[in-house]
Image (cartoon, rainbow, N blue to C red):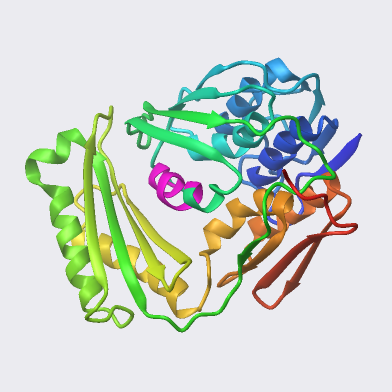
Amino acid sequence: MIIIDGSHGEGGGQIVRTAIAFSIVTQMPVTVNNIRAGRRVPGLKNQHLHAILALGNYANVEHAYLGSTSITCHPTSLVTDETIVVDVKTAGSITLVLQTMLLPILFSNLSSVQLLIKGGTDVQWSPSIDYFKYILLPAISPICDCSIQILRRGYSAKGGGEVLLDITPLGEFDMYKSYGHPMNLSSTTNADVDLIDIYVSGSNNIQRNETLEKVANITQQLLKESTFCTQSTVINQVVSYTDSTSNGSSILLKAHKGSHAKLAGSYLMEKKREPLEIAAKLAIDNLRKEIESDAFVDEYLSDQLLPFLALTGGSLRVREISDHFKSNCYVLQAFLPSLKIDIQDNVVHITHSPPLNPFH
C-alpha cells in the first residue's frame, strides 16, 4: 500500500488527481490522507469526487464522499468501458477531471474510448478547455492520441458545459518501458515570436453585441504595440460562440517562438461589465511573463506535462517551478521508484535509473 500525505507541498487537489490516476494505471493500491488539509474547506470537492466515482468500475475507493479528507483506492481492473460519461453536476472543472481520467483510459487494452464530461469548461482556478485543446493536447501528442469536441461551454456558477473526447489507448502499463522518445523541452532560444494565435470564446447570448470580436481586435492591437512582437510577427484570431446555460468568455494566447517553443497566456472574463481592454491586457501580461523568462513551456503546462514526462523521460525549462509541480513530483516518485527528477534553477531533467526499455 502506497501512503500519500495530501497536505504535502501545496496540499491541493492535484495530489488526489495524480494519486488516483497512477493507482489505476499501475494497479497499485494507495491511501491519500489529509486531503486539501490547508484549504478553507478541506476534503474532496465535486470535481475530485466525480472523477473518482467515474473510475469506480475499475477500483474500490473507500470514503469517497464530499468533504472526505482520506481515501483508499484498491484498483480492480484496467478501464474496460468503451463509452464513459461523467456529469460533475456543478461548474466543477472539466479539465481537472481529465487530469484524473486521461491516463487510466490511455493505459487500457481497448482499441478506442469515447469520454463525455459535463461541467465547467471555463472556470476559475483551472485550465480552460481551450488551453487543454490548443496547448496541452499538442504537447502530449507523441504519447497520447486524443481528439476533442467542445459541444457546450460551461461557466460559473451553473456549469452545463459538455466536452467529447475520443482516445486511442496504448495498452496495459509496463513500469519498465519508456513510452516514446524523451521530450526535450529545455532548449534556450533567443528567437523572436513568430506567431501568436488569439483564441476568444464565449456564450451565444453575447454574440449580438460582437463582444468577442471587439476583445480579439483590442488584443491584436495591444500585441502589435507590445515589446515582444516584431513587424514580422503574425497574429491570428479565432473567435467562437458556443451554446451555454450561463454568460461567460475567455481569452487564450498561444505564442510560437522559434521552431518548437510554445507559450500561453490566458484570462477568464467573469466579471460583469469588465472593460474589454483590461481583460486583453491581463492576458497579454500573463503571456509576457513567460516570453521574457526564456521558458520553453509555460508554468501551467509544465504542471500538466509532468505525469507524461515521467513515462517518456526528458527535460523542461520553465519560468518558475510551481508548488503544483513539486507536489506532482512527490506523488509520481512514490509510484515509480526508478523515477529521478533533478531540478536545477528552472530546468528540470527527468530520467529513470535503471533506464527504461525503449517503446516499440
Q: Residue furthest front?
A: 360
- Residue 92 on the magenta span: no
Looking at the image, residue 273 lies above or below residue 149: below
Compared across the picture, whether 147 is left or right of 233 comes to right
Instruction: Look at 68% across and 26% down and name the residue there.
Output: 108
Compared across the picture, whether 338 is left or right of 208 comes to right
Looking at the image, residue 254 lies above or below residue 317: above
**From the image, which quarter does the N terminus lie in?**
top right
The residue stretch that appears in magenta: 128-137
Looking at the image, residue 82 lies above or below residue 291: above
Compared across the picture, whether 265 is left or right of 56 comes to left
Q: Main secondary structure of the magenta part?
A: helix
- Residue 134 on the magenta span: yes
Instruction: Look at 24% across and 78% down and name the residue there.
Output: 232
**Can see residue 93?**
no
Seen from the viewer's position, the closer of residues 126 and 46 is 126
| Residue 127 coordinates in the image, percent (x, y) | 47, 48
| Residue 350 coordinates in the image, percent (x, y) | 74, 62
| Residue 257 coordinates in the image, percent (x, y) | 41, 72
Q: Quadrant of residue 19?
A: top right
Instruction: Look at 60% across and 28% down and name the residue there.
Output: 51
**Can see residue 71?**
yes
Number of dots carrying numbers: 0
Instruction: Look at 73% across and 52% down and name the residue there.
Output: 310
Seen from the viewer's position, the closer of residues 112 and 150 is 112
**From the image, which quarter does the C terminus lie in?**
top right
Compared across the picture, whether 7 is left or right of 338 comes to left
Q: Residue furthest left?
A: 208
| Residue 287 coordinates in the image, percent (x, y) | 39, 68
